[in-house]
Image (cartoon, rainbow, N blue to C red):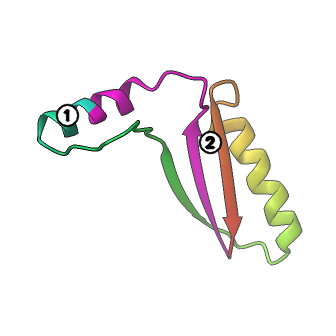
């Protein structure tokens, strides 16, 4: 199995990296660019054959180490 994880800043949190990319795109002539948010994408190979146990393990890992729950949200899927 494989876990695909997306970690993004919460909507209420300022994203200076996203703002810098938005400004750079506009200055380079890419018009019509709205807000840009920058996050992380992770893929983790899982050896666990129990989907529910894998889901619990990935959720715990996301909450404890892969994201900062104060300023980031995460979502994942297991294939």
Q: Along the horizontal axis of the image, is 56 left or right of 20? A: right
Decide which of 59, 11 is in the foreground and name it. 11
Q: Is residue 12 magenta?
A: yes
When the figure is inspected, residue 75 is found, relative to residue 65, above or below; the finding is below
Decide which of 68, 38 is in the foreground and name it. 38
The picture places residue 60, in percent across and down from the top left corner, at 79, 46
Q: Secondary structure at mark 2?
A: helix
Residue projecting furthest to the left: 28
The picture places residue 8, in percent across and down from the top left corner, at 56, 40
The magenta stretch is 1-22
- The quarter of the rendered structure image containing the C terminus is bottom right
The residue labelled by disc 2 is 66
Q: Secondary structure at mark 1?
A: helix
The residue labelled by disc 1 is 24
Circle 2: is it few (<14), some (14-19), or many (20+) Cα within 10 Å? some
Q: Are marks 1 and 2 in contact (CB under 8 Å)?
A: no
- The quarter of the rendered structure image containing the N terminus is bottom right
The picture places residue 62, in percent across and down from the top left corner, at 69, 45
C-alpha span from label 1 to label 2: 28 Å
Q: Along the horizontal axis of the image, is 57 left or right of 69? A: right
The picture places residue 13, in percent across and down from the top left corner, at 56, 23
Q: Residue at x 20, y 36 (%)?
A: 26
Q: Residue at x 68, y 52 (%)?
A: 75
């Amino acid at each position: 199995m494989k876990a695909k994880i997306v970690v993004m800043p919460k909507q209420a949190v300022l994203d200076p990296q996203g703002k810098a990319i938005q400004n750079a795109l506009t200055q380079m002539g890419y018009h019509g660019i709205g807000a840009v948010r920058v996050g992380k994408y992770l893929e983790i190979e899982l050896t666990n054959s129990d989907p529910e146990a894998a889901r619990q393990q990935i959720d715990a890992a996301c909450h404890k180490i892969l994201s900062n729950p104060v300023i980031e949200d995460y979502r994942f899927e297991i294939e």
